[in-house]
Amino acid sequence: MTAIGFIGLGVMGYPMAGHLQQAGHDVTVYNRTAAKADAWVAEHGGRSAPTPSEAVAGAEVAMTIVGNDDDVRAVTLGHDGVLAGLGPGAVIVDHTTASATLARELQAISAEQQVGFVDAPVSGGQSGAENGALTVMCGGTQEDFDRVAEVAGAYAVAVTLLGGPGSGQLTKMVNQLCIAGLVQGLSEGLHLGMKAGLDIDQVVDVISKGAAGSWQMVNRGSTMARGEFDFGFAVDWMRKDLGIALDEGNRLGARLPVGALVDQFYAQVQARGGNRWDTSSLIDLLTNP
């Protein structure tokens, strides 16, 4: 059993913290909206705390999953932040999709307090969090990673160290760019098939067994064709992630033309009110021009 402070109970964090409690860990949660933390305790047990620092007091591991760089700083630094409540020897695991620059910054600040830090963004969406089937991409030292990998396994099918601080966030950027291009290609292929009068369910079943097959095709192809876009990972969040990746690309001198183009397509989805539609909604730009 590990004493864990868990910060952030959104659509991802809520079930992730639940898996930790079910695995037998001693979990204390904090959420900006206290009612959400109270609901989690009523459902899973454990405890809630009124501030991040109190949630992680005495914890061996502090886990955070919030919105963006500013949110991570808000719950980590300051009088009521995570670092104010952790003792030497503890480790912070940040599951937020944020910038690699922030990861390196917080790793250095944490090290000054003899606290470890692992940047560990996840992939798998809401269903992956609920089913304990996330992929966790980690950056940090081997020592810090080894101390938290088994704990994170409570909600993951893979927990992998990719390199030093920031490497997890960089890998998540690669992941999101690949998804963006894939969803656009899938949208265009399905659109052509629909225009041609093909049975899209049959088409998806056939081509998913070949080189074009992907998780997106198998799990979203048919729902995309039906115009159903209520599956968890919102366009607003995808644009945030792509913005991080494009900024990093500019910093590194990496050309990302398709990523930039698809980001603008998602901006068009937002403009038609699809902010909370899931990322497969790119097809709506083609089927409802």
Image (tube, rainbow, N blue to C red):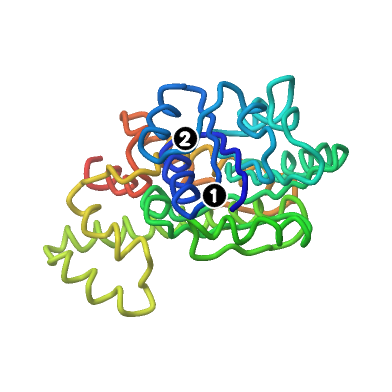
Query: What residue is pinned by disc 2?
Result: 9
Q: In the image, 143: left or right of 10?
A: right
Name the residue at 77% across, 47% down: 116
Q: Nearer the viewer, residue 99 or 113?
A: 113
Q: Nearer the viewer, residue 137 or 188?
A: 137
Number of other residues with Cα within 10 Å of mark 2, as a class: few under 14, some 14 to 19, many 20 or more: many
Q: Position of residue 209 (x, y in %)?
A: 30, 79
- Image point 37% across, 56% down: which residue? 131
Discs 2/1, front: 1
Q: Quadrant of residue 222?
A: bottom left
Badge 1: few (under 14), some or many (20 or more) residues near its Cα, within 10 Å?
A: some
Where's residue 192, x and y in %? 24, 60
Q: Position of residue 255 (x, y in %)?
A: 65, 54
Query: If you read the primary sequence from the N terminus, does the residue marked by circle 2 or circle 1 appear first?
Result: 2
Figure label count: 2
The residue at 36%/52% (across/down) is: 127
Q: What residue do we see at 37% from left, 73% from top?
A: 212
Image-based side of 135 in relation to 84, left or right: left
The kind of residue on which mark 2 rests is Leu
Which residue corresponds to mark 1?
25
Residue positioned most to the bottom: 210
Q: Nearer the viewer, residue 209 or 98?
A: 98
Q: Kindly state the secondary structure of the residue where label 2 is placed.
A: loop
Q: CA distance from mark 2 to mark 1?
A: 17 Å
